[in-house]
Amino acid sequence: MTEAPYTLQRSMPRQRGYDVVVAGGGPAGCGAAIAAARLGARVLLLEATGCLGGMGTSALVSAWSHLSNGRETVIGGLMLALVEAMYERGHIAPSYDRSFWTTRHDRGFGYDPEGYKRLLDEWCAAAGVEVRFFSRVIDAEADAATGTVEGVVVHGVEGYAFVETPTLVDASGDATVADLCGAGTLRAGRDTERIMPPTLCGLVEGIDYDTFHRGLQQEAVERALRDGFFSQPDRHVPGLFRSGPRHATLNAGHLFGTDALDQAGLSEAMRRGRALAEEYTEFFRRYVPGCQDARLIATASLLGVRESRRVVGEYQLDYADYASRRHFPDQVAIYCKQVDVHVYDASPEEYERYRRSFEERDALAPGESYGIPYGVLVPRGWGNLWVAGRSVSSDVPVHGAIRDQPACLMLGQAAGTAALQALREGQRADALDTARLVGALREHGANLPQATLSVEMTRSEPPSRQ
Ligand SMILES: Cc1cc2nc3c(=O)[nH]c(=O)nc-3n(C[C@H](O)[C@H](O)[C@H](O)COP(=O)(O)OP(=O)(O)OC[C@H]3O[C@@H](n4cnc5c(N)ncnc54)[C@H](O)[C@@H]3O)c2cc1C
């Protein structure tokens, strides 16, 4: 296929009247939209699919990692309220109780994606968020020289529309909107050496949980490898995460080398992912006790993308911060998931690199956590644009730690709160009073234990504008 430039001129409806526009309704986008709306903002949430929840629903990644550091609850604010509400409604997998977010440092637990969708629908409606489904942001009107965005072009069932906004939160997971605006971004595999592979997840039913234990999986993987069972000899199989009485989220089958920002690569990954999901279900049936009746009910409609594009922010959270368990005066979330950079290929050396990092070198001890400062949300030099979720500003190892849903939702809450503060106080995103922001987040339940606050954010470099 040849790609020659083509100039298209069209007029489209111009829509206005919002304080905050959020692109993407995953955990980050929902956190941003609900937080801003509860504070009184007129919020528009644009979501490309037909439901909220992002990877947790449309990609069937229906599990939350690390909510407690083993001594106390680390999450706070909307995220904690969400877990409690899901628990009260019976949407958390049967074997999990409150200890998983109060005293246990566990690698995560499953939830019912349908219950999650409904709860997010309800919370958005109650807060007064205008949610538009099947609405994809495809372009932006912005001036990179002043770091100002005027609005976004949205494609939906009625065609194109230009939505004007004084503040914009990019929660697309891929920093797509920040990139369209002309903000600095890093693309995995182009600006970094490699891309952490995605997985197409699925829903498996028919598991006998009296017999099945996650601890039995790795030994079964080793046996299947010795038998030459798999089409790719990948030792790293996250596996089944219980999400209901007899069903589980299937997270197995790395799609090595896939660039989720490449149309052909993305399409091929969906096809190959469906074949791998069937292969791994057969593996569970044959090799893992309690799974002999397992059946793949569905694969996800969205690819489970771990890494794609990140923004270049006012602060880049890096491995040295992680290793020292650094906390910041302007942190807007604290978290306790360890570095989790999946294998880049199926070689034994890669598995050993992953295993050593995950289980030994980068494991967090009980009671440990690290801070995520405000500056990771702000594209460097931008005044009314924030990026929340898995595409915030960090290096590769830290991205592997903070890309999980709880951190994304807390960062979304911070971005939505910051956007409204910027609008009401006349502050730029890159010059926001962060002491005030931390105060507002604390008032809404955020767990931000820092003793000292700072009006100025922590930056990687001096401000680009004075
Ligand atoms: C295979 C896999 C397993 C994982 N396991 C876990 C786990 O066990 N525990 C855990 O906590 N986390 C896990 N994660 C990580 C986590 O699910 C994601 O990193 C997290 O959901 C990212 O949140 P987000 O809001 O940034 O983006 P997403 O969840 O990706 O949501 C982005 C939303 O934006 C929408 N969107 C995208 N582009 C546009 C656009 N242009 N316009 C409008 N809407 C748009 C998408 O449709 C989507 O709904 C896993 C991820 C993967 C891929």
Image (cartoon, helix red, strand yellow):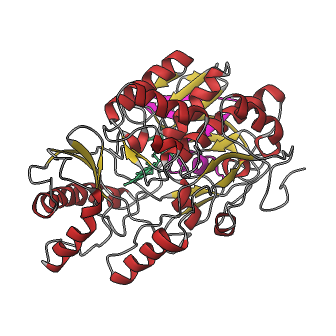
Quadrant location of the N terminus in the rendered image:
bottom left
Q: Quadrant of residue 222?
A: bottom left
The residues colored magenta run 154-183
Q: Residue at x 14, y 53 (%)?
A: 291
Magenta-colored stretch includes residue 190: no
**Above or below for 67 versus 402:** above
**Residue 463 image position (x, y, % from top left):** 84, 55
Q: Is residue 286 left or right of residue 198?
A: left
**Residue 153 image position (x, y, % from top left):** 54, 35
Residue 433 in sight: no
Q: State the residue lying farthest toward the bottom.
A: 349
**Residue 11 image position (x, y, % from top left):** 53, 28
Q: Quadrant of residue 38?
A: top right
Residue 248 or 412: which is nearer the viewer? 248
Q: Residue at x 24, y 76 (%)?
A: 233
**Residue 431 image position (x, y, % from top left):** 83, 44
